[in-house]
Image: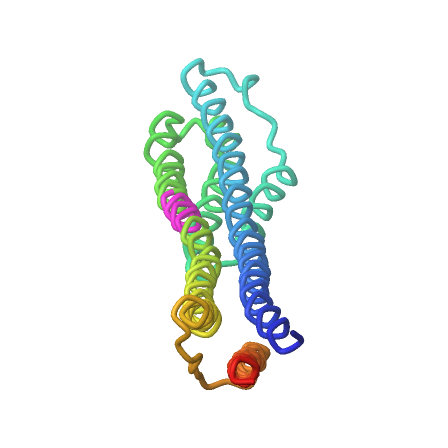
């Protein structure tokens, strides 16, 4: 039975190995895609947060200067914290790694710097009698602020577009990761089908034929003559059945001969 056992173990082991291998590949692929895309999405979110912070502090600074113009009160002039502004600008720039987005980031940083440099002249303009503060604010400072907003809008649109793309890649990566499992399940089912066909043709069918041959010999004394190709235990069993049947036939002939001889005597 060792050969038969070896064939069964090999067939079932092949199915198990394919399913196990596909599962490992799916897990590794999913983890790889998940880590990669998750980092991209996290980078997008960090960029969005930095861009929002820079927009908020710039908008607040611009509104405070507008309040000075409207109320004509220099005491309302906000404190210009250059280190805080530049730290936010640097954080925004450092949060990007994509070469596609860097030109837009540079545009935002450039327009931000222009707005900051222009705003530093506010005190001088406000105190100068020869310059109308309102005209300077809306004619010089506000256009630089509007340019900053335009560049920031373009950058935000790019970030959100990239975020949607990375989210779609994450979904696609999930489906790619389960493809090996689907393929392996299909291959496993195919192997099981082949194993079933192999079992039916090489074992079940010969056993049925041997049983039919034995029943035919027992009920109608037809000679057992079933033969099939093979070198495993079933072939040995079939040869043994053939030998036993032939010996039984010879035994019956001898018994019949002995009876006839006894009757004649």
Give the left or right position of residue 135, taking residue 64 as reference.
left
Name the foreground residue: 173 vs 63. Answer: 173
Name the foreground residue: 175 vs 3. Answer: 3
Q: Answer with the quarter of the image where residue 17 lies.
A: bottom right
Q: Position of residue 154 (x, y in %)?
A: 35, 45
Quarter of the C terminus within the rendering:
bottom right
Is 163 in the magenta? yes
Q: Which residues are magenta?
A: 157-168
Q: Position of residue 82 (x, y in %)?
A: 62, 39
Residue 199 visible to the viewer: no
Q: How many marks?
A: 0
Q: Position of residue 256 (x, y in %)?
A: 51, 80
Name the foreground residue: 60 vs 26. Answer: 26
Dominant SS type (magenta): helix
Q: Position of residue 137 (x, y in %)?
A: 39, 30
Q: Residue sitting at 39 percent across and 76 percent down? A: 222
């Amino acid at each position: 039975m060792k050969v038969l056992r070896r064939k069964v173990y090999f067939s079932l082991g092949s199915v198990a190995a394919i399913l196990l291998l596909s599962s490992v590949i799916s897990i590794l692929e999913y983890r790889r895609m998940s880590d990669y895309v998750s980092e991209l999405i996290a980078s997008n979110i960090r960029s969005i947060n930095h861009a929002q912070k820079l927009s908020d502090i710039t908008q607040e600074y611009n509104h405070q200067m507008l309040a000075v113009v409207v109320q004509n009160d220099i005491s309302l002039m906000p404190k210009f914290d250059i280190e805080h502004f530049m730290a936010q600008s640097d954080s925004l720039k450092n949060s990007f790694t994509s070469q596609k987005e860097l030109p837009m980031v540079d545009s935002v940083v450039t327009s931000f710097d222009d707005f900051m440099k222009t705003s530093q002249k506010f005190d001088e303009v406000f105190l100068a009698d020869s310059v109308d503060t309102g005209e300077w604010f809306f004619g010089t400072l506000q256009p630089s602020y509007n340019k900053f907003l335009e560049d920031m809008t373009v950058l935000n649109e790019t970030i959100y577009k990239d975020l949607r793309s990375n989210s779609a890649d994450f979904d696609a990566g999930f489906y790619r990761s389960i493809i090996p499992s689907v393929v392996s399940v299909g291959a496993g089912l195919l192997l099981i089908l082949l194993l079933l066909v192999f079992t039916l043709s090489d074992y079940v069918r010969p056993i049925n034929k041997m049983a039919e041959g034995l029943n035919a010999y027992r009920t109608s004394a037809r000679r057992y003559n079933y033969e099939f190709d093979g070198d495993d235990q079933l072939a040995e069993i079939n040869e043994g059945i053939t030998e036993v049947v032939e010996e039984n036939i010879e035994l019956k002939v001898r018994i019949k001969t002995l009876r006839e001889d006894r009757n004649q005597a």
